[in-house]
Image (spheres, rainbow, N blue to C red):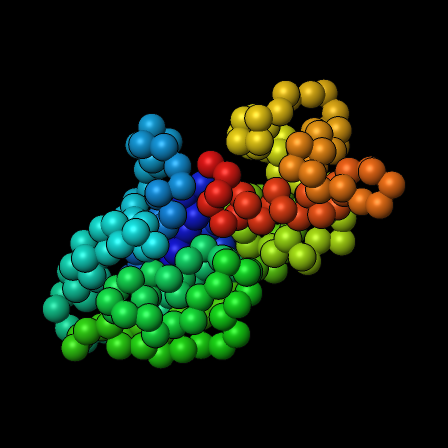
């Protein structure tokens, strides 16, 4: 199961995890995107049966292959790669394979169907579309880990407000604006600074909100 290091707990699909335990499936919790958090934050993440990696930077991907072989006890194995949308499942498979085979995109929900890819002589992987928990299909947690694409929000300003408040100063620091009491005004201040303006000279808060969400989800804001 691939998780997002920026919010590990929210990126665990508890429904799938429960089924894995129920059917006694051997598993590894792969904490991906470790390059997007500080070393201090990384040290605080402690989960059983887990590995911390960065698929994008090929950090510890060789160690993950060794871990899979250990879990499989040297036998041939098929590994299902599961998790929420945009946690980096396809990027992980490409990093393990050593060349691009699974299509990737920063847009949530890019993988449409199950793809079967051979990683080595003994390891076959199934790349699956991201699956939301049935009871949890929205909320700021899904925004933080990029499970919901910025273009799919009906009210991107509200989503950006929740995200900015959850990140507690990171967005303001990135754009070089003061942290104010009204977060919506913060979005407008960022829009003015970036010259994202509508006709009439008003700040385009909707467009700016989408940009803020997208920049966080793609790792530009840290």
State which quadrant residue 38 falls in: top left
Instruction: Name the residue: 71% across, 42% down.
Output: 196
Query: Residue at the right extreme?
Result: 200
Give 130 or 205, whichever is nearer the viewer: 205
Q: Position of residue 137 (x, y in %)?
A: 63, 55
188 relative to 86 in the view: left or right: right
Name the residue at the left extreme: 74
Query: Residue at 49% of width from left, 70% of height from top?
Result: 111
**Where is residue 19 drawn, in percent x and y?**
44, 62
Q: Out of 46 and 20, give the one closest to the viewer.
A: 46
Classify 73 as above or below 205.
below
Q: Quadrant of residue 208?
A: top right
In x, y percent, where is residue 64?
22, 56
At x 52%, y 74%, the residue is: 112
Q: Is any atom of residue 24 visible in this view?
A: no
Q: In the figure, 91 relative to 75: above or below?
A: above
Counting every numbered tag in the picture gives 0
Q: Residue at x 16, y 77 (%)?
A: 121
Taking the image as drawn, is residue 28 in sight? yes
Point out the image quarter for the N terminus.
bottom left
Nearest the eye: 47 or 141:
141
Q: Quadrant of residue 192?
A: top right
């Amino acid at each position: 199961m691939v998780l997002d290091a920026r919010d590990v707990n929210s990126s665990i699909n508890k429904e799938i995890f429960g089924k894995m335990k129920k059917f006694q499936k051997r598993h590894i919790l792969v904490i991906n995107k470790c390059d997007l958090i500080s070393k201090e934050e990384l040290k605080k993440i402690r989960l059983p049966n887990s590995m911390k990696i960065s698929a994008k930077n090929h950090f510890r991907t060789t160690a993950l292959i060794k871990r899979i072989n250990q879990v499989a006890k040297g036998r041939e194995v098929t590994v299902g790669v599961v998790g929420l949308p945009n946690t980096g499942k396809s990027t992980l498979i490409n990093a393990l394979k050593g060349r691009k085979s699974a299509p990737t995109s920063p847009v949530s929900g890019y993988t449409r169907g199950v793809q079967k890819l051979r990683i080595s002589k003994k390891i076959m992987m199934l790349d699956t579309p991201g699956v939301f928990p049935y009871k949890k299909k929205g909320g700021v947690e899904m925004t933080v880990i990029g499970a919901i694409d910025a273009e799919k929000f009906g009210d991107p300003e509200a989503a950006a407000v929740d995200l900015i408040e959850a990140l507690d100063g990171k967005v303001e620091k990135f754009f070089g604006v003061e942290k104010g009491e009204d977060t919506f005004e913060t979005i407008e201040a960022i829009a003015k600074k970036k010259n994202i303006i509508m006709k009439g000279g008003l700040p385009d808060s909707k467009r700016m909100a989408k940009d803020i969400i997208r920049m966080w989800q793609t790792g530009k804001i840290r």
